[in-house]
Image (tube, grey):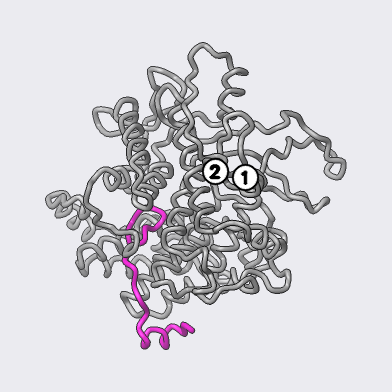
Amino acid sequence: MLIMDLKNEYARAVDMIKKIEFSLPDGEFAPYFETIIRYLGGLLSAYALSNNQLFLDRADELAVKLDPVFNTMSGLALYSVNPTNRKTSGSEIGILAEIASLQLEYSYLAKLTGKKEHFQRAGTLLHAFENANLEKTGGMLPTRWNLTSAQPYDAHVSVGAQADSAHEYLLKQYLMTAKTDKASLKMYLRATTHIITNLLYISPTRHLLYVTDEIMNFKSGKSYPTHNFEHLSCFLPGLLALGAHTLPLDDLQSLGINLDDIDSDGTFGTARIDHETLAGFNLKKLHLWAAEGLAQTCYLTYADQPTGLGPDEMIFNTAPPKKSWDSTASQWRAAQGILWLKVMKKWNKSGSRGVPPGLEDKKPVAPNRMNYRELRSNRDYEMNKVAYLLRPETIESLYILWRVTGDLRWRERGWRIFAAIETHAKTSSGYASLSAVDTLPAKLFDDMPSYFLAETLKYLYLLFINDNPIPLEEWVFNTEAHPFPVFEWTEQERQLFGIL
């Protein structure tokens, strides 16, 4: 409302914020992750944009009421809390995205209030990650964590569900604190290096670039890609583009970072080898190429459908299209697929002629009269989850790429998605998710997630206006698209919070 200058709506919202009660009946619990990114993030962002003390006071009050969620041996957050009776609920095993998407909110709240306890909530998390055993995952944060030991519970790495925003916050914490949190930057570099070297694949027919997850078999010690591709993962091209835009990736030594900072003694498994593998590339260009190729694939999963809207999850074909027997695990494994980096090395060695692999302009593959097998072969993927849930990730990445590159095609693709939303998801009382993107007329669920307003429509608005009210160099979006300003710690704050 503040960004769009909706004064009347904003005034009504202020009255609601005054009256809202952060309370729940006995036996009910607020999911911590969702509450932080939506409520706390929204209040802090509203304060940043309006300077209205009400928002800051209510944000501080909410953070205090949620604080029992940190009553674990490690100080990492449990799943949920009742803000009234202070009881908590949740397993000893935490999900990465749910325990590691709070640094922006708590760091900014500490800056505004001067309260050390808020800063320590973010600091405890970062300290845990710095001391975690990440040898099996090449320095990338896995999806499940033991909340007692603050150590990984598995070696499953992903940028999709259960992981996405944790990786996002590594870069954004560094940017929001005026590029001073070098520990977060190192973790971001390890994560993106592992992603580029191990999780990016190129499809056999259309040469679509996609990112997948990797699961380790503990008997063999080997990791296997699933070739699942989630809509949630479509935030990654925007993150990579933001990193390429804001970091001197081709000159990390200017930031005081060298190869030993990535991994000096094998602590992070293959991290050093993976980083050395990228030495033949201009890292800034490589990150942006990955962003553009992934964003094109995300867009094409929309454009391929008769509704023009994208499915929630797909599985990509691999080459050769057959399975192999894993004698250690005693089961069949899907073919490994074609790593994008291997193809990029060949392209680089041959003189880097033409467009980098995976970035060539592709046309949508419409269903027409093709049968299921033909459609899967021609598209290079099949849909696992056919619903469109009004998600923001693809639009978010198109917006960031538009701002970073100035290339109109990202804006044009965003407009086509917006037109499809207007055509198929709009109702007389709002918008609704589609139960299937490959069916006409579209069938709708009776729901409109809150993130559709907070994220999807916000990014669409910012994509289409000519002004730039939230410059990427001056603001950082939290994972619910609430913008926080970049700030610097004062010397007094550094001493108070123990910032080195």
Q: Check disc 1: other Cα within 10 Å, few if <14, some if 14-19, many if 20+.
A: some
Say which label, 1 or 2, has the lower sequence index.
1
Residue at x 58% of width, y 23% of height: 378
**Which residue, given by chain and number where applicable, does mark 2 sit on?**
356
Could you say where residue 416 lies in the image, as x and y percent from the top left?
Answer: 34, 31
**Which residue, given by chain and number where applicable, does mark 1 sit on?**
347
Depth order, front residue of 323/204 = 204
The disc labelled 1 sits on which kind of residue? Trp
Pointers 1 and 2 in contact (CB under 8 A)?
yes
Residue 452, quarter of the rendered image: top left
Q: Is residue 378 left or right of residue 8?
A: right
Would residue 351 be visible to someone looking at this image? yes
Could you say where residue 199 lies in the image, as x and y percent from the top left?
Answer: 63, 48
Could you say where residue 397 lies in the image, as x and y percent from the top left?
Answer: 41, 46
Mark 1–mark 2 distance (CA, rounded to whole Å) = 7 Å
Q: Is residue 307 left or right of residue 357?
A: left
Residue 145, quarter of the rendered image: bottom right
In the structure shown, which secondary structural element does the residue marked by tag 1 occupy?
helix
Q: Check disc 2: other Cα within 10 Å, few if <14, some if 14-19, many if 20+.
A: some
Q: Which residues are magenta?
A: 476-500
